[in-house]
Amino acid sequence: MPFTDEQLRAIAIAERVGGSASLLGCAFIVTTYCASNAFRKPVNRLIFYASFGNAFAAVASLMGRDGVIAGPHSALCLAQAFFIQYWMPTDSLWSFCMAVNIYLTFYRRYSGEDLKKLEKWYFLFCYGLPLILATTLSVIKTTERGRIYGPALIWCSITEPWQFLRLVCFYGPVWVVSIATFAIYATAGVRIYRQYKALKTAKYELPVNRALSVTQSVSFDVTATAAKGSGSSPAMLYSTSIESQHSRTRSGLDIQANNNNAMWSYLRYSFLFFMAMVATWLPSFVNRIYALINPSEPNFGLNLAGALVLSLQGVWNAIIYTSTALRIFKAQWASIVKSRSHRRSPTRVTGGGAADVSLEDVTFDTRSDVGSTSSLAIRPPLESSVVKSGDL
C-alpha cells in the first residue's frame, strides 16, 4: 500500500536534513583545504575533489519531493533525476581512484608527482563517464514506457517502468567499482602487513647479528697486523668503520619503515572512505532488491534509511577528512590561541607520528622487490630519500 502523507513528509524532512548537513560538510572541506597548504595531503586532495560531486548530490536531496509534486514533465523533476543519476555515484568512483593510487604507488613505484599527473584523468573518469550516462538516459523516451526520468516515490529518479535500469545504470556501476576497490585494498593490505613484519625482524635482529659477527672475525686479523706495525691502532679505526656501516644499515631500514607506515596510513584512511561509501549505498540497494521482490508493498523504513544515508555523503567525507587532518587542526588552534596571547613564538604545523608520513615522499629501491618477505631492498640514507613527517 502507498505511504501516508506523514510518512512522505518524514522522508522529505530526512532528505533535506541530510542534504543541508552535506552542504555544510562540503563547505568545511573546501574552506579549510583552500585556506592552508597543510591540509593538501594525498588523501585529503581526493576527498576535496569528491566534495564537488557531494555538493551537487546534496542539492538534489534538498529538492526533496518537490519534483515529484511538480510532475513528471517539470524542469524541477527532470533536474533532480539528472543530478541524482550524475552526481551520487561519483563518490564510489573517487574511492576507486584512491585504491588505484595505492596500487600504483605500491606495485608500480609511482611517486607523488606521478600521481598528481593522473588527477586530470581521475576527473575525466569520475565526472566524465557519469555525465555521458546521465545525459543519455535523459533523452531516451518510448511510447510505451515514456521518459526514463520521472517521479520515483521518494524523489525524481529512474521511473518504475524502467526500474531494471536502476540496477544496471545506477547501482550496477557503484558495486562493480566497489568490488574492484575492495580487491585492491585487500591485496595491498596483506602485502604491506607482510613487509612490516619483515622490516621489523630485519631492524631488530639482522643488522645487530651481522655487525657483531663481522667485528669478531676482523678484529683477529687486524690485531695480528697491528703486531707487525708501529704506533697506530688499526683495530680501533676498523671498529669505527664497522659502526658506521651498521648505522647506515639501520638508517636504511628506518627509511623503509617510514615508507611502509606512509602506505599503511594512506591505506587506512582511504579504506575508511570506502567503508563510508558502502554504508551510504547499502540501505538503498537493499531497498531496491526488496522493491523488486515486493513491488506493491514499499517498505517505509528502508525508503527512509535510503533517502537519509544517500543524502549524507558530504557528511561522511567531512568526518574522514577531519580525522586525517586532526593534528593539523590542533596545531592551527594552538597557533590561534598563542597569537591571541601575544606570544611571539609561532607554532609550526607539522605531524608528530610515524603514521602521518606522506605518500608523496615514499621512495622505492627499484633494484629489488621491496614487497618480498624474503629479501628487503634498502635505500641509502640520502637526504632526498628521507620521508618527511606530517604530510598525510
Image (spheres, rainbow, N blue to C red):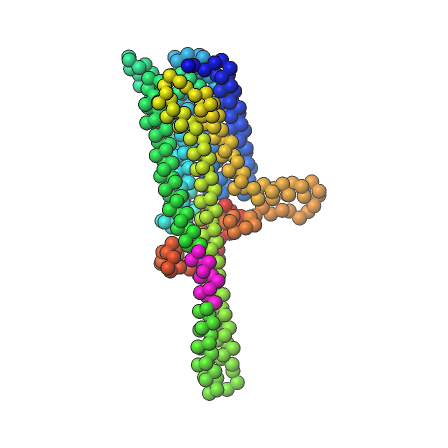
In the image, is residue 247 above or below residue 317?
below
Residue 129 position (above or below residue 358)? above
> What is the x, y in percent for residue 171?
37, 28
Quadrant in the picture for the N terminus: top left
Is residue 287 among what the camera can see?
A: yes
Above or below for 340 versus 373: above
> Magenta stretch: dominant SS?
helix
Report the label total.
Answer: 0
Along the line of sight, the residue nearer the viewer: 193 or 316: 193
Magenta-colored span: 197-208
Instruction: Determine if residue 53 is in view.
Output: no
Q: Residue furthest left?
A: 143
Q: Is residue 203 magenta?
A: yes
Q: Is residue 303 left or right of residue 348?
A: left
Residue at (52% x, 42% y) in the render: 324
Q: Is residue 242 magenta?
A: no
Q: Residue at x 60, y 42 (%)?
A: 330
Depth order, front residue of 10/210: 10
Q: Position of residue 350 (x, y in %)?
A: 56, 48
- Counting from the top left corner in percent of width and height, residue 100 is at 38, 42
Percent position (x, y) of residue 31? Answer: 54, 34
Q: Residue at x 36, y 49 (%)?
A: 107
Name the residue rendered at 36%, 42% in the picture.
Answer: 183
**Horizontally, is 96 left or right of 308 in the view?**
left
